[in-house]
Amino acid sequence: MPPLAEHYEGLTAELEVSGDPRLTRPKVRGSRRTPPVLVFTADAVRVTAPGGAVTAVRTPVLVVVQQRGGGDEAHGRGARESLSSAWRGLLPSTRIRVVARAAPPLSPADQVAAVLRVTADAPPVKVGAPSPVQRLAGHLRAGLREATDGLRPDARALLPGLVVGDTSRVPPDLDDAFRATDLTHLLAVSGSNLTIVLALLIGPPHLATRAERRGLAPRLGLSLRGTAVTGGALALAFVVVCRPDPSVLRAAACGLITLLAIGTGRRRSLLPALAAAVLLLLLYDPWLARSYGFLLSVLATGALLLLAPRWSAALQRRRVPPRIAEVIAAAAAAQAVCAPVVAVLAARVGLVAVPCNLLAEVAVAPATVLGFAALAVAPVALPAAQALSWCAGWPAEWIAGVARTGAALPGAEFDWPGGWGGGLVLAAALVVLVPVVRRVLRRPWLCVLCVLAMILAVCRPAPLTRVLTGWPPPGWRAVVCDVGQGDGLVLAAGDGTALVVDAGPEPQAIDRCLTDLGIRRIPLLVLTHFHADHVDGLPGALRGRAVGAIETTTLQDPPGQAQFVRTAAAAARVPVIRAAPGERRHLGPLTWEVLWPPAPPTLPGPSGPFGPTDSTSQPVGADDLDGPNDASVTLLVRTGGLSLLLLGDLEPPAQRALLASHPELGGVDVLKVAHHGSAYQDPPLMHRLAPRLALISCGTGNPYGHPAPRTIAALRAQGARVLRTDTDGAIAILGTTARLSATVNGHRIKSGPVPGRRTRRRPVSARRAPARPAGGRPPGGGLPGGCRPGCRRPGGYRPGGRPPRGYRSGGHGAVRSRPGRRRSPLRRCALPAANRRTGRCRLRSHRYRPRRQRRPWDRPGRPTPRAAQRDGEGRRRGCVVHEGVGRAGSAGSASHGCC
């Protein structure tokens, strides 16, 4: 098998299924969503090579069953149902014949020798039926699924997982919540499940060998040996029904050794039983030594045996009730020893694991007992099993609610260095922390302070977070969220209210960004187009927020992802409307206009919760749009005097068409670069926009090379400061036209002049007026009053500064003020964007003084040292001439304008 896999040969193999088929979660790669595939483990027993040679083998393989077609049509529940039920119904020990293409495993250390890729265009060819034991186990599992069909979604998905480890119905958001709160051990059937089952038979373990033993065994008249034999049969049945996963095998081995001690009348010793079980399992299957699940199970069990009793006794000495002390000690001990391993795997540390486990513990036993009762009754009396499942659904929903609530807290987890290095550092930190906690427990007031500090760290109230981290910065106007390889932008529209443009590829990322910003209301959520890196995070944006409407593009392509948006919106009861070019809306301080895409001829104008819209564009057929990227909704947004242009993922043809259809489009303050900063940009559009700040949203280490170096170079050549989420994280835009600035990861960034160019631009914090229409006159009637901070007026003073003695500000020049009257403040103006690079700023070399106060060197053409210094400063700041636009009658401004 390995030589065939090395050459990716096609072959025919006869397989014996060893694990239950399971569906993988769809993933977003670029703009597409990979379809879900069915995977299961098997043993290859006979292989027919391409040349016809037949070889009998016994080789473990991983089978990947793929569906023909793209991933756009296969999404969510529809894609799961589209896979053949014959493949999903395969039971362990079934023999099948497949035609597959072999491939090597991802890592040489994997437990399988090859990966067989099979296309699910036909049901599997069965050459051998499953064993009677596996048929019975499959019948029981199917009966439990049927008994839970009428429950609520969370209970329907969770109850089979709690009882037999069947997670086929668990949705991705619930699975993520269990991972964030470290409750996944409840879905991976482990010793707690078997302990509950055996406790029903033998009662409390410490009384199992005494005359006053409890449980069902003495009531049924079973002796100690009969109890041990019955318990062993239950343990073996537990392994068969719940499948021989590492945690199940460890629990069953420990249980069998304990039952053996009960049957022989010997003293029960749990720690030697654990050691013997681990040794026997490793001798039986050495691959368990590389299983993280087996490692976590052994560590948690060892912590419960060694650390939990001591910690419980310490809590009881401090007047904690015994039962509460035992539960707290067990949860804390298991979390302490397992946290370093979790950090190795997931590069995170959970802060809510212990309280969530404590809250979920009260519901685990009722849900498990009632679930096992439904499992046993379902083949005989389905109505009775449904009644038991309905009763078990209540504690199951409680557990799901605990997981969702804990995962929704802002500080539920925080990042930690991954790998073994990070795990060792965390283990060392925990070793140091244990004696500190012991001393803290001796002082009640320190305990109260620590609890309050933990609550603040988990809840992260916005005022405290802003003070400690500086994020979000006060007065932010727009934020580009760090959502990975995708887009997600938030525009502030008031307290807790925002306009959201795109949702990124992952629900967790956009949800975390909106939570950090304190966004609770989204009157309008714009999805520029239906690619997965823009819409797959929609459930995260909708979670726990009031959304008024979802506005989408006119091109419903890809159709599968467009259907996903409609389904998610319908589930949240949010209307979906379509954007039309020319529509104008306002929301608080925001005003925006849709510039693109062109509307289809039959598309009506949008209507929604914002009243009527203004649509003046001519209808264009769908043939004019070349793919979803060119149908991206393009918005021109204005807020606080700033202008922002959001280009979506427009390609160069659509960018040229946008420029042609909007010839009045001029310079903007902030540009969201199209298509994650790819190399495909339209230079004339970039030159026309001339942004002061260019924002690029892309993922770290993406395989597409975004952003392209030549795109960044072109933007910098235009004088723009480029910020990107893959290196800078989330980006917040602040200020006004006069002082534009950005905050990256809580640190304020101000752009300075870019070295290495002949023409330098002013910093991002400079003032700028709205752009002049192409071919038109500058704002303000075309007068040369435009100016910028850092340049001086002909009167010799800076804009915003104090005029010379005896003069007041008079629009575009210094005007003599009347004696005794208060000088009026300077009216600030700005340089028209269309004239910024037409030349260099040449300042007049004389001051405006009364003639009797002029000095000899104040005559025109005789520069003073200070004037020469100002002239050099103006050149350094990139001031520009208004050639031929001088104001008649203004001294010193007949041949040039001020900067």
Image (cartoon, rainbow, N blue to C red):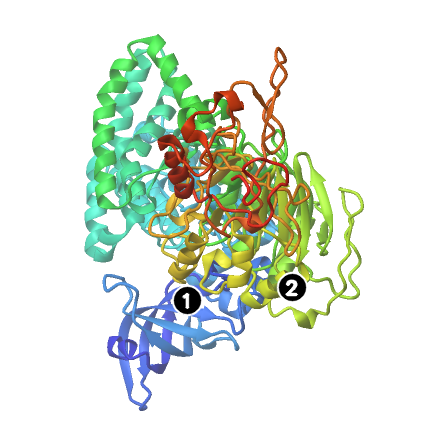
Q: Residue at x 47, y 67 (%)?
A: 90
**Lateral position of residue 238 relative to residue 84, left or right:** left
Q: Which label sits in the foreground, 2 or 1?
A: 2
- Residue 779's quadrant in the figure? top right
- Say which label, 2 or 1, has the lower sequence index: 1
Q: Secondary structure at mark 1?
A: loop
**Lateral position of residue 80 relative to residue 240, left or right:** right
Q: Is residue 471 above or below residue 148?
A: above
Residues under numbered marks 2 and 1 in contact, where contact means CB atoms less than 8 Å apart:
no
Quarter of the rendering occupied by the N terminus: bottom left
- Residue 50's quadrant in the figure? bottom left
Q: Is residue 888 above or below residue 212?
A: below
Camera-side residue of 420 and 727: 727
Q: Residue at x 47, y 52 (%)?
A: 166
Would residue 379 be seen by someone viewing this image from the given angle?
Answer: no
Would residue 318 be seen by someone viewing this image from the given angle?
Answer: yes
The kind of residue on which mark 1 rests is: Ser
The kind of residue on which mark 2 rests is: Ala
**Lateral position of residue 577 relative to residue 465, left or right:** right
- Residue 323's quadrant in the figure? top left
Q: Residue at x 51, y 47 (%)?
A: 881
What label sits on residue 131 in the rendered view? 1
What label sits on residue 619 in the rendered view? none
Estimate the x, y position of residue 43 in percent, counting from the top left. 33, 70
Camera-side residue of 576 and 266: 576
Name the residue beneath numbered marker 2. Answer: 660
Estimate the x, y position of residue 278 in percent, counting from the top left. 22, 46
Q: CA distance from mark 2 to mark 1?
A: 71 Å
Estimate the x, y position of residue 470 in percent, counting from the top left. 43, 28
